[in-house]
Amino acid sequence: MKIAVICANGRAGRRIVQEALSRGIDVTAVVRESNQTEAKQVLKKDLFDLTADDLKGFDAVIDAFGAWTEDTLPQHSTSLKHLCDVLSGTETRLLVVGGAGSLYVNPEHTVCLADSPDFPDAFKPLAAAMARALGELRRREDVRWTYVSPAGDFRADGERTGRYILGGEELTLNSKGESTVSYADYAVAMVDEAEKGTHIRQRISVVAE
């Protein structure tokens, strides 16, 4: 299997690269600056400059893009649109490192986690930007995309257990009543989906057991 990890130098991207390499997958790290991952194959290029030729021949492209400041939040939409346009009409899968704020917290799917009273105000702009990008992605029928939301508590320094619960559109709690997952276990789930998942044009979610 041959995959590309875009924005591979980020915290999620590095762990996804590491997980894929541990399975013997052919991995290309796509980075803007010097490579900080374990990948030997590197494409040094800005996401917005990627072309169809750059991504040709990959079985899956994993988008680990992230933007956090007020002026860059719209790039969640513009970056995803660019990748969709580049991959339009191809068999290459596009797997997106998503957010948790847009997960539903009621069976009617009318209230999202970001709407709940305990959701931190500081993260609401980011959640809104990522939710808009997901909404736009849902309209793309020309791309084999999968959007992978982490649990509400996404822990960068958590351990890799190799176990997780795969959920869907709703916020899933584990046996302890928690919504948490480490970056390492999220990477396990992401690479599992790239290798054998069938959730085409669906949003899935991941929580630790």
Image (cartoon, rainbow, N blue to C red):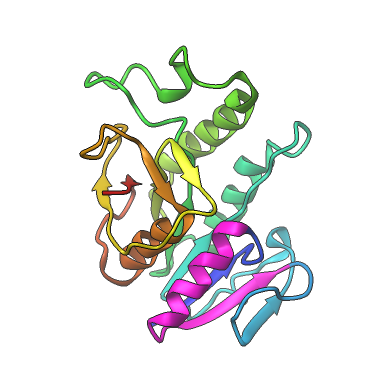
Q: Position of residue 134 (x, y in %)?
A: 47, 38
Q: Nearer the viewer, residue 38 or 75?
A: 38
Q: Is residue 114 above or below residue 132?
A: above
Q: Is residue 15 magenta?
A: yes
Q: Look at the image and give the residue range highlighted in magenta.
A: 11-31
Q: Nearer the viewer, residue 43 or 179?
A: 179
Q: Residue at x 41, y 75 (%)?
A: 59
Q: Residue at x 31, y 66 (%)?
A: 192
Total labels drawn: 0
Q: Image check: 199 left or right of 8?
A: left
Q: Position of residue 50 (x, y in %)?
A: 67, 67
Q: Is residue 127 above or below residue 151?
A: above
Q: Is residue 68 above or below residue 195?
A: above
Kindly tell me whether residue 21 is visible in this rendering: yes
Q: Is residue 14 magenta?
A: yes
Q: Position of residue 36 (x, y in %)?
A: 69, 73
Q: Residue at x 75, y 36 (%)?
A: 69
Q: Quadrant of residue 24?
A: bottom left
Q: Image check: 144 left or right of 48?
A: left
Q: Nearer the viewer, residue 87 or 160?
A: 160
Kindly tell me whether residue 149 is visible in this rendering: no
Q: Image check: 75 left or right of 152?
A: right
Q: Residue at x 48, y 81 (%)?
A: 57
Q: Quadrant of residue 126?
A: top right
**Which quarter of the rendering shows the N terminus?**
bottom left
Q: Image check: 17 left or right of 122?
A: left
